[in-house]
Amino acid sequence: MMGSYYDQYRRYCETLTAMDRDIVRLLDFLDEEGLDDNTVVIYLGDNGMQWGTHDCHGIREPYEESIRLPFMVRAPGLDAEAGARRPQMALNIDIAPTLLELAGLPVPGDMDGQSLVPVLRDPEAEGWEHFLLEFWRYFPEQTPSYSGVRTKQYKYVEFERGRQPWLFDLQEDPEERNNLYGTAEAEAVVGGLKAIMER
């Protein structure tokens, strides 16, 4: 048994607090040992978590709370202000090319992902225009599989069964409360979003 919802959330918060404390210890150690000028530290999660947002619990729904995740970088030579934030989208497949470039090594042309070094150095640098969203149903969970695309403005998702597609305008509706699918606005943009997915 996992205990009550309250107990799960409390343990989740306790884990986050412990991780925060230990990350500080790790960074302090690197500084004290003089390793900070030659060490890249990347911190990220593998998914977001919903604790009641949209009346959902867990990681399976393609809301922003699930698909967005922490991604922090501390690296020598970036000349970025400490604590600076970037609005560009980043993907986990970007980690390998980013590390290669930071190490001064060539990034293979056939490698998935793109180096985030330009974005880390310059808040105005171009990032991803869009990316693919996918989820495969697995036992014992019964959340339907889905695929979709997220752009800077829109998120479009098609479900395997039982649900109509989603279309959210993330600029006008960042909390994803108003599904535009079936509206005139949707008719104007869904075809282009489907074409991106097919590519």
Image (spheres, rainbow, N blue to C red):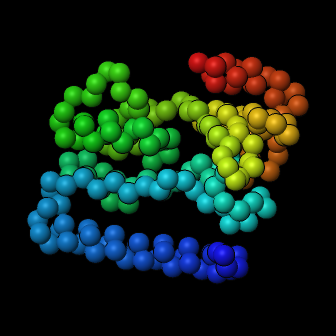
The image quadrant that residue 59 belongs to is: bottom right
Q: Position of residue 179 (x, y in %)?
A: 82, 42
Question: In screen coordinates, is 123 left or right of 144?
Answer: left
Q: Is residue 59 above or below residue 109?
A: below
Residue 70 at x, y percent in the picture: 48, 56
Does any portion of residue 174 appear in the rendered image?
no
**Figure quadrant of the N terminus:** bottom right
Q: Where is residue 18 shown, x and y percent of the image? A: 42, 77
Query: Going 64% across and 41% down the picture, which residue do you hit?
Result: 135
Drawn side of residue 134 relative to residue 36, left or right: right
Q: Nearer the viewer, residue 8 or 129?
A: 8
Judged from this view, the residue extending furthest toward the left is 34
Q: Is residue 79 above or below residue 198?
A: below
Horizontal side, residue 8 vs residue 100: left or right: right
Residue 24 visible within the image: yes
Q: Residue at x 43, y 55 (%)?
A: 44
- Which picture quadrant has residue 195? top right
Q: Quadrant of the C terminus?
A: top right
**Horizontal side, residue 18 vs residue 29: left or right:** right
In depth, the one of 105 and 10 nearer the eye is: 10
